[in-house]
Image (cartoon, rainbow, N blue to C red):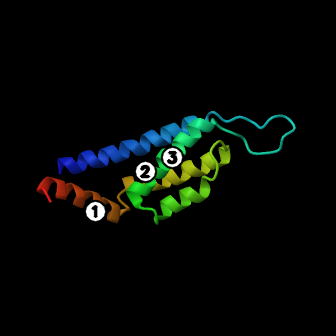
Amino acid sequence: MEVLLKKTEIIDKRFQDLLEFGNRVLSSRRAPPEGVLGDFSVDLEKSQEWSTSTAQLLKSLFGPESEYYKRFQDSFQSAGYYSDMVSGVAVLKAAWGDYSKGYLVEVRSLVEAEIFGLCAGI
């Protein structure tokens, strides 16, 4: 049981870290140059780093066919755009909210089964 708690704490911490990182990227918002119509921008390198880590977490935790991963892929089209960051952070918040409140029984069961297998030597 202690191993399960540790694993869920690690996952929970990763969600928190990515949300904090996403909010820092959002705070780097810059208006387009004068005379240019378009979306606000954010730090390109940091937004790419954040989106890669977030996509990997969602894919690893929920699977490539999950609604969370598919929504993230659909909403985060281009690194460096403020609106894509806002959408991506919203998907991550939804995933974390559902995960942390225990709404994702299948994912928690898989984590528990993996831990049980490790403890039992399977």
How far apart marks 2 and 1 lie (CA) works out to: 17 Å
Q: What SS does tag 3 mark?
A: helix
Q: What SS does tag 1 mark?
A: helix
For the point 28% across and 62% down, the residue is 109
Q: Amino acid at mark 3?
A: Thr
In the image, 47 versus 11, the foreground residue is: 47
How far apart marks 3 and 2 lie (CA) works out to: 9 Å
Image location of residue 103, percent across then percent down? 38, 62
Location of residue 81 by image quarter: top right
Task: Name the N-terminal-most of marks 3 and 1.
Answer: 3
In the image, 25 versus 79, the foreground residue is: 79
| Mark 3 and mark 1 residues within 8 Å of each other at the beta carbon | no
Q: How many marks?
A: 3
In the image, 89 versus 58, the foreground residue is: 58
Task: Name the N-terminal-most of marks 2 and 1.
Answer: 2
* Of the two numbered discs 3 and 1 in the rendering, the one whose residue sits closer to the viewer: 3
**Residue reaching furthest right?**
35
* Of the two numbered discs 3 and 2 in the rendering, the one whose residue sits closer to the viewer: 3
Image location of residue 99, percent across then percent down? 39, 56
Task: Name the N-terminal-most of marks 3 and 2.
Answer: 3
Q: Amino acid at mark 2?
A: Leu
Image quarter in which the C terminus is found: bottom left
Residue 96 in sight in this render: no
Mark 1 packing: few (<14 Cα in 10 Å), some, or many (20+)?
Answer: few
Residue that carries the numbered disc 3 in the rendered image: 52
| Residue 57, numbered label | 2
How far apart marks 3 and 1 lie (CA) works out to: 26 Å
